[in-house]
Image (cartoon, rainbow, N blue to C red):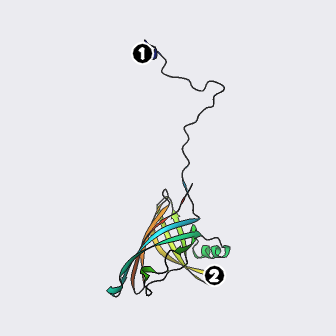
Amino acid sequence: MLFLALACMPKSLEVGTDTGSAAVDDSSEPAAPEADFSQYTSSVHWSYDTWGEDYDCEDDMVETGEAVTDEDDLEALQAACALCDHFYVANFDKEAICDYSTTHSVGEDYRGFVLDDDAGVAQVYRFDESDGDFEPELLDGGATWDPEAFTITFSGSLDWYGTMSYDVELAFPVIE
């Protein structure tokens, strides 16, 4: 008998007609995540092919970047790279690559990024600073920018008593 009663009930049911109930809107989508462009962290893998085989090596380091906040530096960086969207002071977790005194030493550095969300590409710059003036050097003009994961991947090389190649995976944190 119960089965017959359920089968005879209407197929639609009105909800929320009571004046004391609150309407529930479950059609809204969760907010899309946003990147925190005030900082980044990257892993850098170096391959050092020296002119002499005895010193070839590979090494990994971590680079962290904090957004440039000094007004004079920011103005000078913008003058050096008008297309750049973001500028950072970069620091490294090591003082030298491969722990050799003869290899390239690293210290504080400057970065700039041009990000194209639609094309998924980025340009990555580093800057040499001299008396408050900045000279840009393009590290990678065709880096991969993932605007959903907030990551940049790029690679390149430089000559310093051989060839130093680098592969970088850079990530901006997500605003929680």
Query: Which of the 4 quarters of the picture holds residue 19?
Result: top right
Give whichever of discs 2 and 1 has the lower sequence position: 1
- Graded by Cα atoms within 10 Å as few (under 14), some (14 to 19) or many (20 or more), the crowding at tag 1 reads few
Q: Amino acid at mark 2?
A: Gly
Residue 23 falls left or right of residue 155: right
Residue lying at the far top of the rendered structure: 1
Answer whether residue 66 is visible to the viewer in this image: yes
Which residue is depicted at the point 57% across and 63% down? 37
Residue lying at the far left of the rendered structure: 53
Query: Which of the 4 quarters of the picture holds residue 85?
Result: bottom right
Q: Position of residue 94 (x, y in %)?
A: 49, 77
**Viewer-proximal residue among 124 and 49:** 49
Residue 135 falls left or right of residue 8: right
Q: Amino acid at mark 1?
A: Phe
Which residue is depicted at the point 67% across and 73% down? 71
* Residue that mark 2 sits on: 132
Q: Position of residue 12 (x, y in %)?
A: 50, 22
Q: Which mark is residue 3?
A: 1
Q: Quadrant of the C terminus?
A: bottom right
Q: Position of residue 114 (x, y in %)?
A: 53, 67
For residue 34, above or below residue 162: above
